Amino acid sequence: KAGVTQTPRYLIKTRGQQVTLSCSPISGHRSVSWYQQTPGQGLQFLFEYFSETQRNKGNFPGRFSGRQFSNSRSEMNVSTLELGDSALYLCASSLSTGGYEQYFGPGTRLTVT
Amino acid sequence: ELKVEQNPLFLSMQEGKNYTIYCNYSTTSDRLYWYRQDPGKSLESLFVLLSNGAVKQEGRLMASLDTKARLSTLHITAAVHDLSATYFCAAEDSGNTPLVFGKGTRLSVIA
C-alpha cells in the first residue's frame, strides 16, 4: 500500500508570495492533519480535515488555510509568506478522526527568502 | 491545555550502553506515541501505547506508559550507531484533539 505522498518536496518562495502544498493520504484514510516543524518551535499542529470539513485548527494566523477534497486529498495554502514560515510541513493521514494512528508523509521543505 | 515535555533534549551515548528517554505530559492522555526522525526525513512511527502499564518492545527499543505518573519512557538497550536519530513522544488528551509533541530528543550514538 502506498504511503502518504506530499508535493512538492522542496520549494523556495519570496516574502509576500503565496504557496500551496498538496498531500495525498494512504488509500482508505479519510483524515488528514498538517504540522509545521521548525528548529525553534518544534512540531506544531496546523489543522485537521475529515470528510472535507476542518475538525481542528492550531494556533496559526489566518494566512494559513487548508481544504480537503472528496477523494481525501488535502491542500494547505499560506498567503503573504513571511521569513518565519520557512519550515518543514508534514502531512499525516489516518483512517478516521478521533484517536486513530497517524502516518506521516515525507514533508515539504519550504524556504522563504 | 496538554503539554508534553521530553528529557533529555540531547543525548550522546556510547555504543553498547543503555539509556532512557523520559516523556512527561500534563493532563490525562488517551494514548502516547513515540516517533523516530532521521535528519531531513519524516516521522516514523515506533510505538503506540494505549493503556496504563503498556509495554512494547522492538529490537533494542522498549517503550512503557504509566498513566498515573503521566510518564512514558523509551529505553534503549545496548545502543548501536543506527539508532542515532531524533525521537519524539506525542500525546493527545482525548480522541478528538490533535497530537501534542514533545521537543524531541536528539540521540547520537558514538563508538
Image (tube, rainbow, N blue to C red):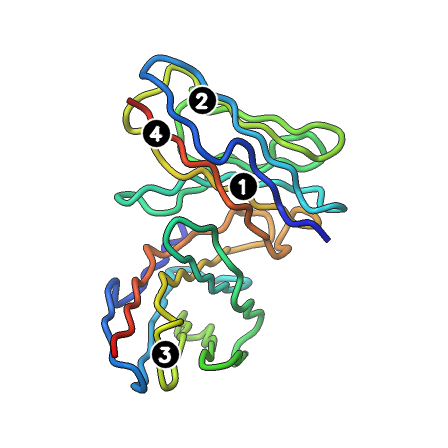
Question: Which quadrant of the view contains residue B89?
Answer: bottom left
Subunit that carries the residue with mark 3:
B
How many residues crowd mark 2 within 10 Å: few (<14), some (14–19), many (20+)?
some
Q: Residue B15 location, x and y as percent?
A: 30, 82
Q: In this view, does B92 lie above or below B82?
A: above
Q: In which quarter of the image is the C terminus of chain A?
A: top left
Residue at disc 3, secondary structure: loop
Numbered circles on residues, count = 4
Q: What residue type is labelled 2?
A: Val
Query: Does label 3 lie on the same chain as label 1?
Result: no
Q: Distance between the residues labelled 4 and 2?
A: 12 Å
Q: Where is residue A64 in the image (x, y as percent from the top left)?
A: 45, 24
Q: Nearer the viewer, residue A75 or A11?
A: A11
Residue matched to label 2: A78
Whether residues under marks 4 and 1 lie with C-beta atoms below 8 angstroms apart, the answer is no
Residue A99, compared with residue A22, is above or below; it is below
Q: Name the amino acid, label 1.
A: Cys
Quick one: SS at disc 4? strand
Q: Mark 3 points at which residue?
A: B80
Marks 4,2: beta carbons within 8 A: no
Tell me the residue at 38%/80% (across/down): B76
Can you identify the residue that label 1 sits on?
A: A91
Of helix, strand and loop, which one carries label 1?
A: strand
* Mark sitting earlier along the chain (1/2): 2
Where residue B51 sits, quadrant-wise, is bottom right
- Quote the CA–CA distance across marks 1 and 3: 30 Å
